[in-house]
Each structure stands twice: as structure tokens, then as C-alpha cells.
Amino acid sequence: MDFNKYTEPLGGNKKFIILCIVVGSVFVTMGGCTGIVRLGSKKNDKKIDKAEETQAVEEMQTVSESESEITTTVSETNVTETTEETVLTEESDNGADSDAVEQTQIELIAGELGEYGQIITLNEGSDLADTNYCYFVPSGTYQVTNMGEHPTQVDVYKNERSTDTDADGNEYEYWADGTAYLIDVGTTKEVVVDEGYFIEIEEPTHIVLLTEN
């Protein structure tokens, strides 16, 4: 650019001033362009930042949905395992019940009737009268323990009377069939009571009968 063309009619100072104005205008113009470029760059940066933010949000939502699905799956698995454990526990309980054996215990004390006792007299009204405590317990095989302080005898008789005659010609009654069991103190012996039979004991006998049903 030929500055002399515009400054020749002016004095030296005026020429210098115009030169400064022209140069200043050029810098301002360049600065404006630079500012426009930077502004555009900032706008592009904002667009990029916005796109990255949107993408990050979408990724977070995807991760959240995946975690939710995993949690649901784990919960369903836990429910299934709990259900299986419950079934196994119930089956185990049923098995324990089926294996359990119910036991029946009966305590007999001579001189006390209790639930099964009856007082029966043979040869009643005669000089041979014999009164005893007889216990009609359910038939079965018992483990009988002597709880007393002395050895005892446990008699098992058939509830059927027979008669016979002694040397003097006197008729008398007796039980048709029976078995005697001798049991020492604190010991246990197996005693069988058949259907239609009963147990007879004399004082001070105290025994406990145990059977499996």
C-alpha cells in the first residue's frame, strides 16, 4: 500500500498519525477475525462436550440396566436356592419322622391299680382264697426293669381259670397257663405278654415296662 499517496499533502506529523490509524485498523481487523475464529472454536467445543455428555449418560443408563438385570437374576437364583433348601428340609423332616419309633412306657407298682390294674381273687370264699393285683397291659414284647430295692418275680398268666382237687379232696382254682420272670435289682429282662394274658406282681414290686410300637 502506497501511504505517500494519501499523506503527501499533509505535514510530517499528520502523515505519521494517518499511518498509525491505518496500521491500527489492520490490527483491529485481524483481532476481530481471530476473535471470530476462537468463538467458533468455543461453539464447536461446546457441541463436542454436549455430545460426549449425552454419550456418557447413555452409557450410564446401559450399565444401570445391566446391573438391574444382574441383581434380578441373582435374586431369582437366591429364591430358587431358598426354595430348594426348604424342600430338602421338609423332605429331611419327613424322613426323620418316618424313621422315628414311638415308645410306650408303663409303670407298675404292686398295691396300686393305676390304669391297667384289677384286684382278682382265686378260690374266693374258701380257705385257699388268693387275692392279687393283676395288670392287663396291651399285648406285646416289653423290656422290663426292676426299679425296686429287692429282686422280684413277674408272673404272666393266661386269663383263664382251671380247677383241680387237692389230697383232701378239696377243689381249688388256678390259672391255666403262665410264665415266671425273675428280675434282679436295676436289671432289665425281656417279658412277652400274649393276647389274653396279664401281669401279676406282689408287694413291694416296682417295675417299668418299655415297648416299641
Image (cartoon, rainbow, N blue to C red):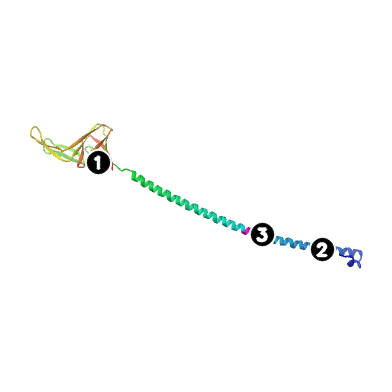
Q: Which residue is mark 3?
A: 48
Answer few, some or many: residues within 10 Å of disc 1's Cα (few below 14, many 20 plus, some between 14 and 19).
few
Q: Splitting the image into 4 quarters, where does residue 152 fall?
A: top left
Q: Horizontally, is 48 left or right of 142 in the view?
A: right
Residue found 74% across the figure and 61% down from its top: 37
What amino acid does circle 2 point to?
Val
Query: Which disc number belongs to residue 140?
Result: 1
For the residues marked 3 and 2, what is the alpha-carbon distance in whole angstroms? Answer: 33 Å
Residue 161 position in % (x across, y down): 14, 39
Answer few, some or many: residues within 10 Å of disc 3's Cα (few below 14, many 20 plus, some between 14 and 19).
few
Q: Which residue is mark 2?
A: 26
Q: Splitting the image into 4 quarters, where does residue 205 fall?
A: top left
What amino acid does circle 1 point to?
Gly
For the residues marked 1 and 3, what is the alpha-carbon distance in whole angstroms? Answer: 96 Å
Where are the magenta residues, as a range?
A: 47-54
Q: Quadrant of the N terminus?
A: bottom right
Q: Splitting the image into 4 quarters, where does residue 202 fall?
A: top left
Q: Horizontally, is 178 left or right of 54 in the view?
A: left
